[in-house]
Amino acid sequence: MTPILVFDIETIPDVDGIRRLEDLPDDLSDREVAEHAFEARRERVGNDLLPHHLQRVASISCVFRDNNGFRVRLLGATTDNEVALI
């Protein structure tokens, strides 16, 4: 069997970056900032998948399959920030 390694990266909106980029008021909640970005994206391209520069890495996991079995791992800890995860 050929070993297979697959990574999965989960992201969340970079609300601080969006707030700065769009010069949005500080009193908007993170949810409101994210929804603002989603709405603008839907209007521009028809979906709400934000470009990479407007996302932050929230978790990284991997799956490894070889002759010894199938293993799933989460990289880092749930308390790690984006820099530590990467």
Image (tube, grey):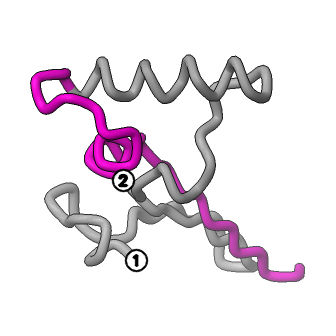
Q: Quadrant of residue 66?
A: bottom right
Is residue 70 covered in magenta?
no
Residue 36: where, in percent of width, then height?
43, 21
Is residue 6 covered in magenta?
yes
Q: Quadrant of the N terminus?
A: bottom right
Q: Is residue 31 left or right of residue 68?
A: left
Q: Quadrant of the C terminus?
A: bottom left
Q: Nearer the viewer, residue 17 or 82?
A: 17
Residue type at mark 2 is Ala
Q: Quadrant of residue 18?
A: top left
Residue 69: where, in percent of width, then height?
65, 69
Residue wearing tag 2? 58
Give yes or no for contact between labels 1 and 2 (Cβ–Cβ under 8 Å). Answer: no
Whether 52 is drawn above or below 73: the answer is: above
Give the residue at x 28% y 32%: 24
Label 2 CA crowd tier, 10 Å (few <14, some 14–19, many 20+): some
Secondary structure found at label 2: strand
Alpha carbon separation for disc pair 1 and 2: 10 Å
**Seen from this angle, which residue lies furthest left?**
27
Tell me which label, 1 or 2, sits earlier in the chain: 2
Q: Is residue 43 left or right of residue 40?
A: right
Residue 19: where, in percent of width, then height?
30, 40
**Seen from this angle, which residue lies furthest front?**
23
Residue wearing tag 1? 86
Whether 67 is drawn above or below 37: the answer is: below
Q: What are the residue bounds of the magenta stretch?
A: 1-29
Give the residue at x 59% y 58%: 8
Q: Nearer the viewer, residue 5 or 32?
A: 32
Whether 81 is drawn above or below 1: the answer is: above
Secondary structure found at label 1: loop
Disc sitting over residue 60 in the figure = none
